[in-house]
Image (spheres, rainbow, N blue to C red):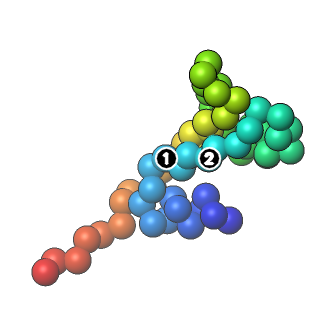
Amino acid sequence: MLLDEATRSGARTVVADTKAHNTAALTALRRNGAQIITSQDTVEVHAALMPNEMPPPPPTANL
């Protein structure tokens, strides 16, 4: 739901951070298409979620 709203709002990437031992979060992120990138310096995992098909950005207001 959050990713759908972000996409409708024009977001192109959503980044989530979790710990390497949080298997439930990692499973959910992978299931939703996350590209998991682990850091060599920390145990944090960065997951960039990028939808396959992006809608056009929302129109901007003319001020």
Please give the residue where the numbered disc 2 appears in the rendered image: 16
Numbered tag placed on residue 57 in the rendering: none
Q: Are marks 1 and 2 in contact (CB under 8 Å)?
A: no
| Residue with the most extreme front position | 41
| Residue with the most extreme right position | 24
What residue lies at 49% left-to-right and 47% top-to-bottom?
13
Query: Element at badge 2?
Result: strand
What residue lies at 70% left-to-right and 43% top-to-bottom?
18
- In this view of the protein, which residue sits in the foreground, 26 or 19? 19
**Residue 38: image x %, image y %?**
65, 25
The relative height of residue 20 versus residue 63 in the rendered view (above or below) is: above
Please give the residue where the numbered disc 1 appears in the rendered image: 13
**Residue 42: image x %, image y %?**
64, 27
Q: Quadrant of the N terminus?
A: bottom right
**Residue 23: image x %, image y %?**
86, 38
Query: Element at badge 1?
Result: loop
Q: Does 42 sit left or right of 24 as displayed?
A: left
- Which of discs 1 and 2 lies nearer the camera? The answer is 2
Answer yes or no: is residue 17 visible.
Answer: yes
**Residue 43: image x %, image y %?**
70, 29
- In this view of the protein, which residue sits in the foreground, 16 or 5? 16
What residue lies at 42% left-to-right and 60% top-to-bottom?
10
- Residue type pointed to by label 1: Thr
Question: Image quarter for residue 39?
Answer: top right
Local packing at callout 1 (Cα closer than 10 Å; few below 14, some 14-19, many 20+) is: some
